Image (tube, helix red, strand yellow):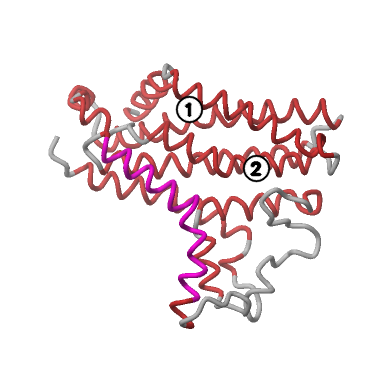
Amino acid sequence: MSWRVVARKDFADAVRSRMLWGIVGLFALLMGVSALVPSLLDIGGATLGYNFAADLAQTLVPVTALVAAYLAIAGERESGSIKLLLGAPHSRLDVTVGKFVGRAGVVLVGVLAGFVVAGLVAVVAYGELAIGEFVSVAVLTAALGVTFVGIAVGISAATSTRSRAMALAIGVFFVFALLWDLVPFALTYLRTGGLDLGGTVPAWQVLVEQSNPSRAFSQLVDAALGSGAEMTAGGGGGGEGAANPFQSRIAGAEPFYLKDWFMLVILGAWTVLPVIAGHLRFRSADL
């Protein structure tokens, strides 16, 4: 298929970026250090180390994915090379899909490198790999990376210049990493006219809060690590007795859209919908 040709070429072009591999190298180093923290503090084993690594990945992976993919299409549109690419037997859909697959491949290699380092650290420091937890967190982190590649490719497809793509990518990162923490306050104020977060809230409000892909990832990691990660750097703690992590906040039974499996739906939506929206704009754009 034509998109496969685009993906292979895009992957090869991306891996030649020194800046990108510098970020991947830093990511691998920090993942290894974070996995070592419980050993240094004498507070836990390999599972807790993976939780610390996941907390760090929750910030670093979105940055890596956005940097890797925000210029995938916009950069070629600004330089004019997109016309050469489309001059070959490639449709605009082939370009969009191929760019997404190619950049996702680059990010997956980076995540794999980071977890290889974290796994080696775990074996040396704790004498065990805790293979189930290791694989679970690695797969979830890879899914988070692919999600942000989808967001970045969607941005890149929808914009025609590097500066616009960069501005939107930076904006997306700050919204998800920082501004989303204000969502509970904003929703509570709109509902009640106050800022008291101590009472119960509607389940739909918790869904909005969890719709941040990084928060969905965090809930999935807590569920995967279970009681082996009671002490966490970022706090979710999906230990025993925490089957409903929102029970203290919502009234009544936990709805299906707050269960762990639905967090995968949220990640999937953030992966696919931005790519579709970006392609629809790219499809009709004047190049």
Element type where label 1 sits in the image:
helix
Residue in view at x 68 percent, y 57 percent: 236
With respect to residue 99, does 222 lie above or below?
below
The amino acid beneath tag 1 is: Val
- Characterize the magenta stretch by its predominant secondary structure: helix
Residue in view at x 48 percent, y 27 percent: 106
The amino acid beneath tag 2 is: Ala
The magenta segment: 163-188
Closest to the camera, between mark 1 and mark 2, is 2
- Quadrant housing residue 115: top right
With respect to residue 232, does 92 lie above or below?
above
Residue in view at x 61 percent, y 27 percent: 28
Q: Label 2: which residue?
A: 54
Element type where label 2 sits in the image:
helix
Residue 181 shown in magenta:
yes
Of mark 1 and mark 2, the one earlier in the sequence is 2
- Quadrant housing residue 77: top left
With respect to residue 67, does 280 lie above or below?
below
Residue 17 place in picture, x, y as percent: 42, 19
Q: Which mark is residue 106?
A: 1
Residue 21 place in picture, x, y as percent: 49, 21
